[in-house]
Amino acid sequence: MTSALPEITRPESGDVVELILDDHRTFEALLRELRNDQNDRDLLRGRLAELLVAHGEAEESDVYPQLRRTDAIDEHEAEHGEEEHREIYEALLRLLEATDLYTKEAGHDLHELSETLLHHLDEEERDILNPARSDVAEADRARLGAAWAARRNELLARGCGSLEQVRALLDA
Ligand SMILES: [Fe+2]
Ligand SMILES: [Fe+2]
């Protein structure tokens, strides 16, 4: 029996906290499916790369600065989030460079990405999404949700997670 592989949905509106959490659940599901060597790891890697970049870049352009401005988070938290995105992209790049995803080395790269990403999800949910939930009004969370989703979906539509694109992102 084969399990259904996680799909990337494209919501256009919603509470920014809930929208971000939905993607975090998708990241966790993608990582879980990637561990299973009976699965098509190439397909899953591609999905994970696209969603990681679209999700993170949209947070940096359409969520972190807005939460900074309303003092929901401080400068340190915003910068720390961006540093962790960079660490995720670096770990992702190593996985994208692998030509065979079923070797011991690729398993190690996958483990590193999993550790780095899960660490970030934990910190972001505690230190950024909690204050966003308590300190930002519902209408503003909806506005941020729409802006974040628009940016994320635009990046997904364009394609943003290729080896070259992740390399360029890290060089910028
Ligand atoms: Fe996130
Ligand atoms: Fe993030």
Image (spheres, helix red, strand yellow):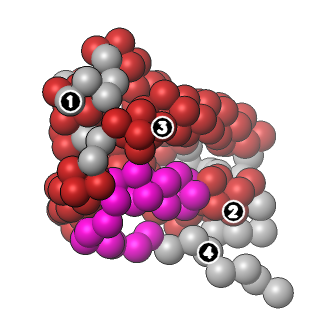
Q: Is residue 31 rendered to the left or right of residue 128?
A: right
Q: Are marks 4 and 3 in contact (CB under 8 Å)?
A: no
Closest to the observer: 71 or 10? 71
Label 4, residues with CA under 10 Å away: few <14, some 14-19, many ≥20? some
The residue beneath circle 2 is 33
Give the residues drawn in magenta, as a range. 8-27
Q: Are marks 4 and 2 in contact (CB under 8 Å)?
A: yes
Q: Nearer the viewer, mark 1 or mark 4?
A: 1
Indicate whether 19 appears above or below 105: below
Q: Is residue 24 rendered to the left or right of residue 132?
A: right
Q: Nearer the viewer, mark 3 or mark 2?
A: 3
Q: CA distance from mark 1 to mark 4?
A: 38 Å
The numbered dot on residue 70 is 1
Query: Residue 11, image x and y in percent?
Result: 32, 72
Query: Residue 133, image x and y in percent?
Result: 41, 44
The residue beneath circle 3 is 130
| 4 or 2: tag closer to the N-terminus | 4
Label 3, residues with CA under 10 Å away: few <14, some 14-19, many ≥20? some
| 3 or 1: tag closer to the N-terminus | 1
The numbered dot on residue 5 is 4
Residue lying at 27% horizontally and 47% vertically, measured from the top left: 137
Closest to the observer: 135 or 152? 135
Q: Label 4: state its secondary structure.
A: loop
Amino acid at dot 1: Thr
- Say if the magenta span includes residue 139: no
Amino acid at dot 4: Leu
Q: Nearer the viewer, mark 4 or mark 3?
A: 3
Q: CA distance from mark 4 to mark 2?
A: 7 Å
Q: Label 1: state its secondary structure.
A: loop
Residue lying at 40% horizontally and 26% vertically, measured from the top left: 81
Classify mark 2 as within 8 Å of ligand 1 or not, answering yes or no.
no
Q: CA distance from mark 3 to mark 2?
A: 28 Å
